[in-house]
Amino acid sequence: MKPGKLKIKISKTLQAKIAKGHPWVHFYQLQNRDIRGNAGDLGVIYDSNNRFLAIGLFDPVSDIRLRILSTGEPVVIDAEFFIRRLEQAVLLRRTLTATATTGYRLVNGENDGFPGLVVDRYGETLVIKLYTEAWMPHLDLFLESLIQVSGCSRVVLLHSRHVERTRSSGPAHGQILHGPPLDGPVHFTENALVFQADVVEGQKTGFYFDQRENRARLKEIAAGKEVLNVFSYTGGFSVYCMAGKCRSVTEVDVNQQALIAARENMMMNFPNKVSKEADFLQIPGDAFRVLSEFKRQKRQFDLVILDPPAFASRKEHKPNALQAYLRLAKAGAHCTRPGGLLFAASCSQSVPAKEFFRSVSLGIRQTGRKEKALFKSKHAVDHPVNFLGGEYLKAGCFEVY
Ligand code: SAH
C-alpha cells in the first residue's frame, strides 16, 4: 500500500529542537493526538508560519510517533533520497576498507539519517534490523537502493522485539530479502582477523561491531598478559588479545552458544591455541558469581575485560545501573594483579560517561586500590552520533595499583 500523508502538529519549542536535528516526536508531544494513520505514512511538520519544517515516518503503535527523515527544505522520499544518504554513510566509513575490515555498521539509524533502521555489513551479507514497522511500506525502495550502493550479494531482514510483537504485515524476522539462503554463519574480517557470526540467532545482528576500536587498543597492550574476558560473547576481545600475543585468555559468559561460537572464532585465527586450558579456558556461568569465586581463590589476571550487557534501558534504572557498574568494577579489581589493567565498558544509553567512570573508580577504590586511566573512548567511526542523547557506548582502561 502506498504510504499516506499526515499533518503533524507540535509545540514551538519542539519545532526548534527538530530544526536543530532532534529526530523524534513522542506521542505525548503531539498537539493532534487523535491523528490516525498507518505505519510508514509520511508525517509532515509545518512551522508556526506554515512553512515546511520536517518530514518523517509515522508509527501508530510506537511511543515515538514520528521519526524524522529530513528537515529544512521539502524533499521527496524516493530511491534517489535513499541512495544519497547511503552514499554518505559509505563515504564516512571509507577508512575501514584500508584496515582489512569487512564487518561493520553501515547505517547507524538516526545518526545516518535512517531513523529506526540499522544495517550491519558482514562481508557480502547485509543485515537490516528494523526498530519500527514504519519502514515496511518503504522497504522495497530502500532495499533496491541498498543493493545498488553497497553491491552486496545477500540481504537479511531482522525485527526488533517490539516490531516482532506488533508487526501486522511484511516479511518475517530472518527472511532473506535478496540473494541466496544462509547456509550457516557468515564470515567477515575485523582488522585482518577472521570471524563468523550467526546473524539470525545471535545477539544484536550477530556481532558487536561497536567494540572494534577498543579491541584493537587492547591488542596493542596485551603482550605477555593473562587475560580475563568477562561477558565475552563470541570472543571478539579474546581473539584480538591473542593476536597481540597475550599469554592466555579465560572467557566467562552465561550463554553456552556464545562460548561455542567464541571457541570457533579463536580456532579460525589461532588453531593451536584452543586445545590447552593453559592458553584458552572458557567458564560458563554468571559473571558476578565467577568473579567472586576467583576472589575467594585469590586468582588474579594482568588484564580484566568487563563488557556487560546494558544495565539500564530507561532513565529510572540509572541509579541501579550505576550501583551494578560499581559492584562489577570492584569484583573485577579484586581479580586484577597489582599494576594490572582493568577495562570497563558500558552500553547503557541512560548512563552518562562521567557517572559511569565515577562508578568504576569508586568500585576500584573500594578494594583499597588506586587507579589511573590509560585511555577512555567513545563511539567508533561506523557508529556516529549526530543528536543529543544518541550516545550510548563509553569505555575506559585503568591501571590498577
Ligand atoms: N564483549 C562482547 C559483547 C558482550 S555482550 C563482544 O565484544 O562481542 C554481553 C554478554 O554478556 C552476552 O554474551 C551475554 O550472554 C552475557 N551475559 C549477560 N548477563 C551475564 C551474566 N550475568 N553473567 C555472564 N554473562 C552474562
Image: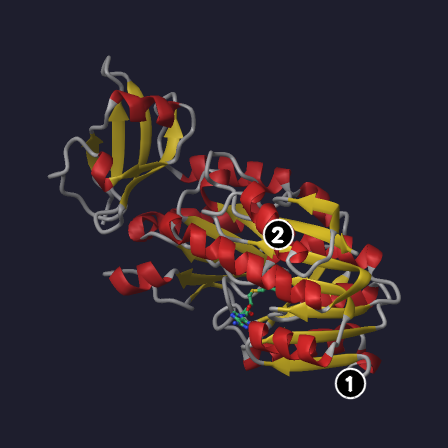
Q: Nearer the viewer, residue 29 or 159?
A: 29
Label 2 crowding class (10 Å Cα cut-off): few <14, some 14-19, many 20+?
many
**Residue at figure coordinates x 74%, y 46% from the top left:** 375
Residue type, label 1: Glu
Which residue lies under the disc numbered 2? 362
Q: Secondary structure at mark 2?
A: helix
Residue 50 — which label?
Answer: none
Q: Nearer the viewer, residue 117 or 204?
A: 204
Q: Nearer the viewer, residue 90 or 212?
A: 212
Residue 277 — which label?
Answer: 1
Which color mode does the image show? secondary structure
**Residue at figure coordinates x 59%, y 46% from the top left:** 358
Of circles 2 and 1, the one toward us is 2
Q: Is residue 349 left or right of residue 380?
A: left
Image quadrant of ligand 1? bottom right
Residue type, label 2: Leu
Is residue 152 placed above or below 89 in the rendered structure? below
